[in-house]
């Protein structure tokens, strides 16, 4: 048994880089990260962006609000990591952070400084090799975050639900069931909800990353296992919508 294992180890170690790279393509994230600790040569292959981008694609297909793009909460204070970004990637990260691009032509160095200065608070600590490996790890850690940002709230569509009861009869549908609708928390502070039949309501963020509409009880944020968001105050509930379906 020991001889067989030794033979297998020697066989893998003797593979040329292009074949070893293909082998690495069959590994999951945990195993691939472990391979990166074997030696310098394996580390370079195991941290390759192609491998980690594919892992991101497979994993993020099952998560909400994660397009296949560099994660906006990655720490790009490492100059080498920052320089690996294209200008298009930097602009996309800034957009997803809710940062307006300054007017006029900017050098890439100016955009990278803006990227460094606008990393959202509460982002996972730590730095890793490679922009896609970093994105994969940060996305996993970020699933524990339960504080929304203003940009997240205002850029999402929300499914609105309310608690049934006699006081909500005017919102029941024809079959006596609570009606649902899409609600918006607009970036200009205006709250839009056809179900409530009111105009001019305003909303704001709470200190703990929740939402409050006018002077009604604030909504506390919760996270679903697949990365969705739920806002609730015991009377009304909002579920973030991604790819046409609300968080559950």
Image: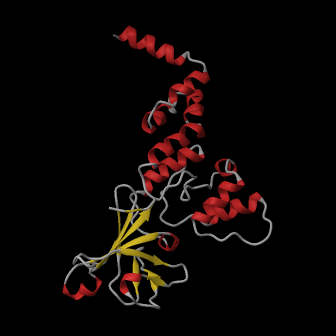
Residue at 26%, 76% (x, y): give it. Answer: 178
* Residue 3 lies in quadrant: top left
Name the residue at 56% across, 28% down.
42
Q: Position of residue 119 (x, y in %)?
A: 57, 63
Position of 101 with respect to 2 (left or right) is right
Above or below 133: residue 13: above
Q: In the drawing, does residue 100 fall left or right of residue 156?
A: right
The residue depicted at 36 percent of the width and 85 percent of the height is 196
**Quadrant (top left/top right/bottom left/bottom right) for the C terminus:** bottom left
- Which residue is more in the foreground, 225 or 171? 171
In the displayed structure image, the side of residue 58 where residue 119 appears, left or right: right
Scheme of colours in the image: secondary structure
Q: Residue at (61%, 55%) from the top-left corner? A: 76
Residue lying farthest to the top in this orientation: 3
Q: Is residue 107 left or right of residue 228?
A: right
Residue ranking furthest to the left: 166
Total numbered labels:
0
Residue 30 sits in quarter: top left
Q: Does residue 128 show up?
A: no
Which of these two is toward me, 200 or 145? 200
Compare residues 200 and 135 and report the one nearer the observer.
200
110 is higher (above) or lower (below) than 21: below
Q: Which quarter of the figure is the N terminus placed in?
A: top left
The spot of residue 209 in percent (x, y) is 42, 73
Instruction: Provide residue 140's location: percent of width, then percent of height.
Output: 43, 51
Where is residue 207? Give x, y as percent. Answer: 42, 78
User: Is residue 236 visible in the rendered structure shown here?
Assistant: yes
């Amino acid at each position: 048994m020991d001889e067989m294992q030794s033979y297998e180890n020697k066989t893998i170690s003797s593979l040329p880089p292009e074949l070893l790279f293909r082998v690495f393509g069959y590994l999951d994230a945990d195993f691939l990260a472990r391979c990166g600790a074997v030696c310098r040569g394996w580390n370079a292959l195991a941290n390759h962006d192609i491998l980690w981008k594919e892992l991101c694609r497979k994993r993020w297909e099952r998560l909400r609000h994660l397009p296949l793009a560099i994660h906006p909460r990655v720490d790009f204070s490492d100059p080498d990591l920052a320089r690996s970004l294209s200008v298009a990637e930097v602009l996309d990260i800034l957009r997803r952070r809710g940062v307006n691009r300054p007017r006029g032509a900017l050098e890439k160095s100016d955009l990278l400084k803006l990227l460094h200065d606008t990393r959202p608070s509460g982002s996972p600590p730590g730095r890793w090799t490679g922009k896609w490996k970093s994105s994969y790890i940060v996305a996993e850690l970020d699933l524990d975050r339960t504080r929304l940002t203003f940009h997240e709230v205002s850029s999402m569509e929300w499914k609105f639900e309310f608690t049934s009861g006699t006081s909500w009869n005017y919102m029941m549908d024809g079959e006596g069931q609570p009606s649902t609708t899409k609600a918006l928390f607009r970036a200009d502070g205006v709250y839009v909800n056809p179900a409530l039949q009111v105009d001019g309501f305003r909303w704001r963020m709470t200190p703990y990353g929740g939402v409050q509409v006018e002077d009604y009880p604030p909504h506390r944020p919760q996270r679903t296992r697949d990365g969705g968001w739920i806002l609730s105050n015991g009377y009304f509930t909002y579920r973030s919508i991604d790819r046409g379906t609300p968080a559950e």
